[in-house]
Amino acid sequence: MNQKLKTTLFLVFVIPYVLVALPIMLIWLSVESLLLRIWFWFNHKRHGRDVILITSESPIWSDYIRENILPRVENRALVMNWTERRFWRQDMPIAARAYQRWSGEKGMVPSVILVRGFWKIENFSLYQAFRDYKHGKQTTLREIEDKLLSTLRE
C-alpha cells in the first residue's frame, strides 16, 4: 500500500472520530466543572469555606505551613494531605477530583486553591517558593504568602 493511500485511510477513519469525540469531551469537561462548583458551593462555600489547602508531611514545608499558613485559613479551609492521597478516592472522592481539576501547574504540592464566587478559582502554588526557601531565599515565599493573604481579605 502506498503512502498516499495510507494517509487517506487514516484521515477517513480519524477525522470522524475526532469530530465526534472532541465535542463530547468538551461538553463533559464543562459539565464536570459545573458539577464540581455546585458540589463545592453546597458542601463548603455556604459554610464559609472557600479555600482548599493541599499540603504534605514534607520536612521542607510542613512545619512552616502548620505554624504560619494554616492558622490563618483553617476556619475557612478544606485541608487535604498529599501524603495520604491514596485514601482520597475512598474518603473524599469529589474533593480529590476538584483538586485534580483546579490545581493547575501539574498539581504541585503545597498549594492553596481559593474559590472566589462561583466561577473564579485562583491557585497559589507554593512548591517553587518552598524550594527557594529551602536554599535560604525567602522572598518568593513571602510574596506569595502576602498575595494570598491580601486576596483572602478581599
Image: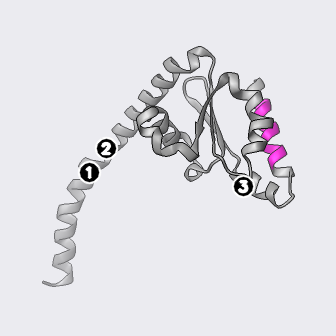
The image shows residue 70, relative to residue 128, as above or below, that is above
Residue farthest left in this picture? 1
x, y percentage for residue 41? 52, 20
Q: On the picture, is 42 further left or further right than 116?
A: left
**Which residue is painted at 22% across and 66% down in the image?**
11
| Residue 145 image-quadrant placement | top right
Amino acid type, residue under disc 1 in the picture:
Leu
- Circle 3 packing at 10 Å, graded few (<14), some (14-19), many (20+), is some
Q: Amino acid at mark 2?
A: Pro
Residue 49: percent from the left, percent from the top? 62, 22
Q: Can you tell which mark lies on residue 19?
A: 1
User: For mark 3, what is the residue?
Assistant: 128
| SS at badge 2 | helix
Mark 1 surroundings within 10 Å by alpha-carbon count, few (fewer than 14), some (14 through 19), many (20 or more): few
Is there a contact, CB below 8 Å, between mark 2 and mark 1?
yes
Which residues lie in the magenta part? 141-151
